[in-house]
Structure formats: structure tokens, C-alpha cells
Image (cartoon, helix red, strand yellow):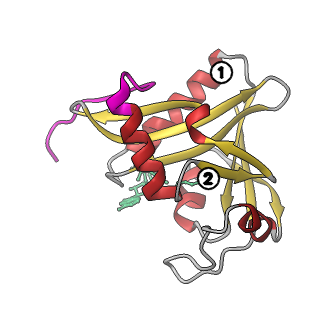
Amino acid sequence: MAEQSVTISPPHNDAERAWLRQLWQAEWGGELMVSRGRVWCLAQLEAVIARVNGEPAGAATYRIDPADGCELVSINAILPGRGIGSRLLADVEARARAAGCRRVWLITSNDNLDALGFYQRRGYRIVAVYPGAIDDARRIKPGIPLRAENGIEIHDELELAKVL
Ligand SMILES: CC(C)(COP(=O)(O)OP(=O)(O)OC[C@H]1O[C@@H](n2cnc3c(N)ncnc32)[C@H](O)[C@@H]1OP(=O)(O)O)[C@@H](O)C(=O)NCCC(=O)NCCS
């Protein structure tokens, strides 16, 4: 693979904010995310963009809650398997630590086996399972598919967390 320079920081300008909106539309069906029964607008959260040789290649959003640590709300790498997701996760963890958080947590869905492996190999533990929570979320966001591309029906939320 050619040498790549990766930078990670909040969006620099309107073009990058537009790129984020396009990413969220393509990957999450829009800007609304439902986790633990709460609805978040991705555009209103803290965001960081990963750029490879200056070109956006991934992004993460998160929110700092002094009472509850840092929730990683979304993470995407459009060039998978090249370390972008790892770099984004480490960047959000560093920002959470700098903000005084003692843990980072996130919700993923029962079908997302790649993400489950990805997080657990990076120190996250499954701390809760919420059976049927995605079925409830689908009532708020009807675009959530009933079945993932890997053939698994999507029903449940899994909560993972890492102590910083
Ligand atoms: C989860 C995700 C952010 C990981 O990002 P990534 O840039 O692929 O991550 P990395 O390259 O740092 O590491 C991915 C791991 O998968 C492996 N991998 C190899 N090829 C891969 C591919 N084509 N796609 C995904 N992972 C691949 C990597 O070797 C690495 O393995 P490891 O865990 O043993 O180190 C990314 O796959 C993604 O955007 N997924 C879709 C959105 C999603 O599900 N987000 C999480 C929701 S909770």
C-alpha cells in the first residue's frame, strides 16, 4: 500500500460538513440516530473527520456527558481495513480522556459482527444487551432495515464500554 498521511480533526469548512451529511445519509439513512431510546441528530454532535492525503475517508461522532462518560454515537470508514476506524476510535478516546471522561461507551446492533470484533479487539467489553431495542428504535426511525446484508435479523442493542 502506498504511504498514506492520515489526519483527524473536527470538520474544517462547509465542504467537509457537507461531506459528513452525505456520509450519514449513505451509511445511516440520514442524520438521526437512536440509541437507548434517545434520538440524536448527528449534525449537532461533536464530530471528527479522518483524512487520507487530505481527502475525507471516515468520521466519528460522539457526545460527552459528565455523568455518563463519552458515548461514541457513530463511526464510519469508507476505506475499510486500512486503520481508519482504529485511528478514529483512538482519537475519540483521547478527546474523551481530555474532557475528564473515565469511560467510552457505544451501542451497536446484534447483526454487526464486524463491529463487535473490532471493538472487543480494542479493549471494549459487552456490558449490556437490550433485547428488542432496535425494534423499538424502528418505530422512531422506520428506515432501519429488518435484516442486515449478512442475513441476520436486526432486533437488539448491545452496549459496549471501555474504561479509559
Ligand atoms: C467498524 C469500522 C468503523 C472499522 O473501520 P476500519 O477502518 O475498517 O478499521 P481498521 O482498518 O482500523 O480495522 C478493521 C479490522 O477489520 C479488518 N479488515 C480487513 N479488511 C476489512 C474490510 N474490508 N472491512 C472491514 N474490516 C476489515 C482489519 O484487518 C482489522 O482487523 P483487526 O480488528 O483484527 O485489527 C468500519 O468497518 C465501518 O465503517 N463499518 C460500517 C459502519 C459501522 O458498522 N460502524 C460501527 C457501528 S457501531
Name the residue rendered at 74%, 61% in the picture: 140
Look at the picture and state if 111 lies above or below 108: below
Most distant residue in the bottom direction: 151
In the image, residue 21 sits, relative to residue 78, either above or below, namely: above
The answer as to whether callout 2 falls within 8 Å of ligand 1 is: no
Q: Residues within 10 Å of mark 2 (few under 14, many from 20)?
A: some
**Region rendered in magenta:** 1-16
| Mark 1 residue CB less than 8 A from any atom of ligand 1 | no
110 on left or right of 55: right
Q: Are marks 1 and 2 in contact (CB under 8 Å)?
A: no
| 81 with respect to 2 (left or right) | right
Choose between 14 and 76: the one closer to the eye.
14
Q: Residue beneath label 1, please?
A: 97
Residue 109 lies, in percent from the top left, at 66, 64
Q: Nearer the viewer, mark 1 or mark 2?
A: 1
* Residue occupying the point 59% across, 30% down: 93
Amino acid type at image mark 1? Arg
Q: What secondary structure is marked by label 1?
A: helix
Return the residue at label 2. 120
